[in-house]
Amino acid sequence: MSSPSSDELRHRYSSYSDEALLAAYGLGASSYSSAAWQIIADEVAARRLNVASAPATPQPVTPPPIEGPLTTDGAVAFALQALTQGAPATGIREQLLAHGLPSTDVALLLEQTVLSWRNQADTAALKTLFAGGLWCGAGLAVTLLTYVFAGETGGYYIVAYGAVFFGGIRLITAFRRLDAVKKQCDLS
C-alpha cells in the first residue's frame, strides 16, 4: 500500500471533527510522517483550536459510516482511516460486518490491517521512547559527571533538569501511546 498524497492527507484531516483533530495532534509529530504532521498542524492553526486541550492519548471514536459498495481495498482503507482516527478495532469489525462482509473475510482483513497499523504505531512510539530515554539519560549523566568533578575540584556543577524533565515527559508519552495502541487494537 502506497503512502497517501498530500491532497489525500489534507482531505482526510480536514474532514476530522475538532475533537478527532485534537486527538491526532495530541499524539505528537513522532506519530506521523512530516507531511502528515504539517497538514495536521496547519489544520489545527486554521481552525484556531486550543492545543492545550489536546489529549495525550486518542479518545475512542466511532468509525464513520460506510457508504456505497465495499471492495477489499475499500475495507482496508476504511479500517486504516478509522484506526488513525482512534476507533477501536472491535467497532471497525462491527461496521464491516454490518455492511454485509462475510465474518471470515472481516476477521482475516482486520487481523492483517490491525497488525500492520499497530506495527507502525508501535514503531513511532518506540522511537519516542528511545529519544526520551536518551534525553533523560544524558541529563542525568551531565548532572552526575559535573557533580563528581565539582566535588573533586570544589567548583560548580550543572543540574540538567530540563533534559531530564523533557526526556521523562517523552518516556511517559511513549508508554501511554503504547498502552493506547494495545487497547485500540484489541480484537477480543
Image (cartoon, rainbow, N blue to C red):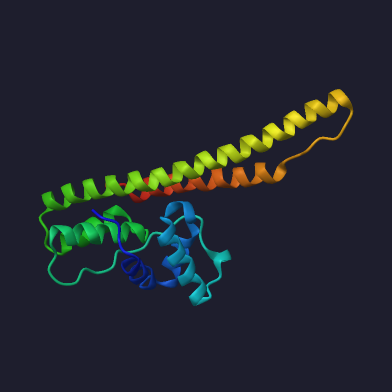
Whether residue 175 can be seen here: no
Q: Would you identify the image quadrant in which residue 74 lies? A: bottom left
Q: Position of residue 180 (x, y in %)?
A: 42, 49
Q: Say which of 66 and 10 sits in front.
A: 10
Residue 40, quarter of picture: bottom left
What residue is shown at x 58% (from left), y 37% (from top)?
Answer: 134
Which residue is farthest bottom?
47
Question: For the point 87% across and 25% down, which residue is it?
Answer: 153
Q: Residue farthest to the top?
A: 152
Q: Percent x, y for residue 146?
A: 77, 31
- Looking at the image, residue 37 sits to the left or right of residue 104; the answer is right
- The percent position of residue 56, horizontal first and vertical second, equals 51, 55
Answer yes or no: is residue 155 visible.
yes
Q: Nearer the viewer, residue 44 or 89?
A: 44
Q: How many marks?
A: 0
Q: Is residue 69 left or right of residue 90?
A: left
- x and y percent of residue 81 in the render? 30, 61
| Residue at x 45% of width, y 68% of height | 19
Which is nearer the eye, 142 or 117?
142
Above/below status of 102 relative to 167: below
